[in-house]
Image (tube, rainbow, N blue to C red):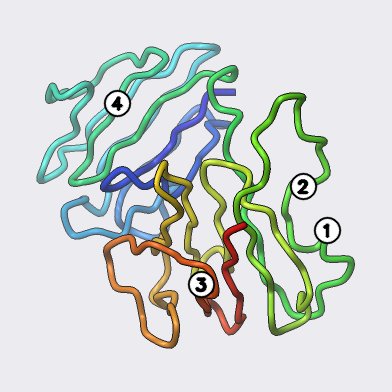
């Protein structure tokens, strides 16, 4: 199925699969794709899907919707098109180009068998010739304490959807942590990170949604 990869300042923060005929995008929490930023209108745009065809329609947003740097009202999307809303960039991808993103690691009270309950898709064997794991996140507190997540994908999201979600994104020079959604900012070594992505180094301690974690680069 088609997917949208949402990023800001070069950091991927979320992946959204298009599964419905109508997918809304905007700042308000009832949208299918919520982008909590003042440059994004409450009801900014909608994606229409009919068969394999996908179109995006601007809903009279304040700052407009752009596809490949051109302002649009309604336009069909092709594989690789770049949508822009505010400072956010959204890459539209078809199935074969949207396989390199990790599912969200969810923290829940009373979690059991972390490999299942954490919601992390680590069960698939690595393909032949895959790069070795370069970093891991170790969960230090809560029901998932002791869980270790390999950061093998371009982006791994962590937290509680609807409450607090953050992303850890692989870059050429290392990994960066960014806030994705929710009023609670992740903290890094005891201090909230703010709105901009921050680099991670070995031994850094993260806290999000009441769960403490440690970043280790291998």
- Mark 2 → mark 3, Cα distance in angstroms: 24 Å
* Residue contact at pointers 1 and 2, CB within 8 angstroms: yes
3 or 4: mark nearer the eye:
4
Q: Which of the two discs, 1 and 2, labels the residue nearer the N terminus?
A: 1
> Disc 3 designates what residue?
163
SS state under label 3: loop
Say which element carries label 4.
Answer: strand
Q: State the image coordinates of residue 169 (x, y, percent, origin top left).
A: 47, 50
In the image, taking residue 198 as reference, residue 23 lies left or right, namely right
Q: Earlier in the sequence, mark 3 or mark 4?
A: 4
Q: Distance between the residues labelled 1 and 3?
A: 22 Å
Which residue is drawn at the image coordinates 44% and 33% (left, top)? 4
Residue assigned mark 4: 82
Nearest to N terminus: mark 1 or mark 4: 4
**Among numbered discs 2 and 3, the one appearing first in the sequence:** 2
Q: Which of 61 and 38 is in front in this view?
A: 38
Task: Name the image quarter holding the C terminus.
Answer: bottom right
> At which x and y percent is residue 131?
64, 35
| Front residue of 97 and 153 | 153
User: Hey, which quadrant is residue 63 in on the image?
Assistant: top left
**Does residue 76 sit above or below 126 in this rendering?**
above
The residue that disc 1 covers is 115
Sooner in the amino-acid sequence: mark 1 or mark 3: 1
């Amino acid at each position: 199925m088609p997917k949208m990869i949402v990023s800001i300042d070069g950091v991927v923060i979320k992946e959204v699969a298009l599964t419905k005929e109508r997918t809304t995008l905007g700042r308000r929490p009832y949208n299918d794709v919520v982008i909590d930023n003042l440059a994004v209108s409450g009801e900014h745009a909608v994606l229409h899907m009919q068969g394999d065809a996908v179109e995006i329609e601007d809903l009279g947003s304040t700052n407009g919707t752009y596809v490949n740097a051109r302002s649009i009202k309604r336009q069909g999307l092709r594989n690789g098109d770049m949508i822009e809303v505010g400072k956010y960039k959204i890459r539209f991808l078809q199935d074969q180009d949207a396989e390199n993103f990790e599912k969200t690691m969810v923290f829940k009270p009373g979690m059991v068998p972390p490999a299942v309950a954490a919601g992390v898709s680590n069960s698939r064997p690595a393909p032949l010739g895959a790069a070795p794991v370069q970093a891991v996140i170790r969960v230090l507190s809560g029901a998932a304490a002791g869980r270790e997540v390999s950061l093998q994908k371009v982006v791994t999201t962590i937290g509680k959807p609807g409450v607090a979600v953050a992303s850890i994104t692989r870059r050429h020079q290392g990994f960066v942590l960014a806030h994705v959604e929710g009023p609670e900012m992740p903290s890094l070594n005891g201090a909230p990170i703010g709105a901009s992505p921050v680099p991670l180094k070995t031994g850094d301690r993260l806290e999000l949604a009441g769960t403490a974690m440690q970043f280790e680069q291998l």
